[in-house]
Amino acid sequence: MFFTEKKGIKIAAQNRKAHHDYFVEDRYEAGIELAGTEVKSIRAGTLNLKDAWCETKSGELFVHGMHISPYEKGNIFNKDPERVRRLLMHKREIRKLQALVKQDGYTLVPLSVYFKDARVKLEVGLCKGKKSYDKRETIAKRDALREMDRHMKERNH
């Protein structure tokens, strides 16, 4: 008998700064080319996406600035924490992203890293930069929603 067990998605890290600095237009899922000790380190939760960004080069997609701390028990097998890592996507998707980034002033930003089944996946966002007035507007909307929720909660009790 053959059983397929559907395992959930476990988020390892999120890039909250990306939502503050960019308008996320579209999201894509990509695999990451990692070493074994890097996967163990991600499972331990020692991953930082804060200043990470993606780049297409000669038909391939790479992530820069993603910091994966060295695995404690990894000794000689540990890789450089800041090394450039290749992302795994279909070639047509990479070409499409490359064209959009060149043409329309978009940028590719890693939004989150998660485990899907046993594989590590990276969610890449096709983003447009926010101006400072856009950031203030977003903060004002969020504060207004919070204030309304607070008043509704008081009214219901």
Image: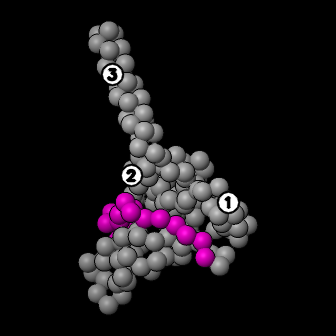
The disc, 1 or 3, on the residue closer to the chain's N-terminal end is 1
Query: Residue 105: where, in percent of width, then height?
Result: 60, 56
Report the magenta residues as a range.
Answer: 40-57
- In what quadrant of the picture does the N terminus appear? bottom right
Q: Residues within 10 Å of mark 2 (few under 14, many from 20)?
A: few
> Which of the marked residues, 2 or 1, is nearer the chain's N terminus?
2
Residue corresponding to mark 2: 17
Q: Is residue 119 above or below residue 146?
A: below
Give the residue type that dot 1 points to: Gln
- Can residue 126 be seen in the rendering of this structure? yes
Q: Verify CB contact (< 8 Å) between mark 1 and mark 3.
A: no
The amino acid type of the residue labelled 2 equals Lys
| Among numbered discs 3 and 2, the one appearing first in the sequence | 2
- Relative image position of residue 152 (x, y in whole percent): 36, 14
Of the two numbered discs 2 and 1 in the rendering, the one whose residue sits closer to the viewer: 1
The quadrant the C terminus occupies is: top left
Q: CA distance from mark 2 to mark 1?
A: 24 Å
* Towards the viewer: 54 or 124: 54
Q: Secondary structure at mark 1?
A: helix
Q: Which quadrant holds residue 64?
A: bottom left
Residue 128 vs 98, above or below: the answer is above
- Asked if residue 142 shows in the view, the reply is no
Q: Residue at x 36, y 70 (%)?
A: 67
14 to the left or right of 54: left
Tag 3: amino acid: Glu
Give residue 147's mark.
3
Asked if disc 2 and disc 1 are in contact, CB closer than 8 Å, the reply is no
The CA span between labels 1 and 3 is: 40 Å
Local secondary structure at mark 3? helix
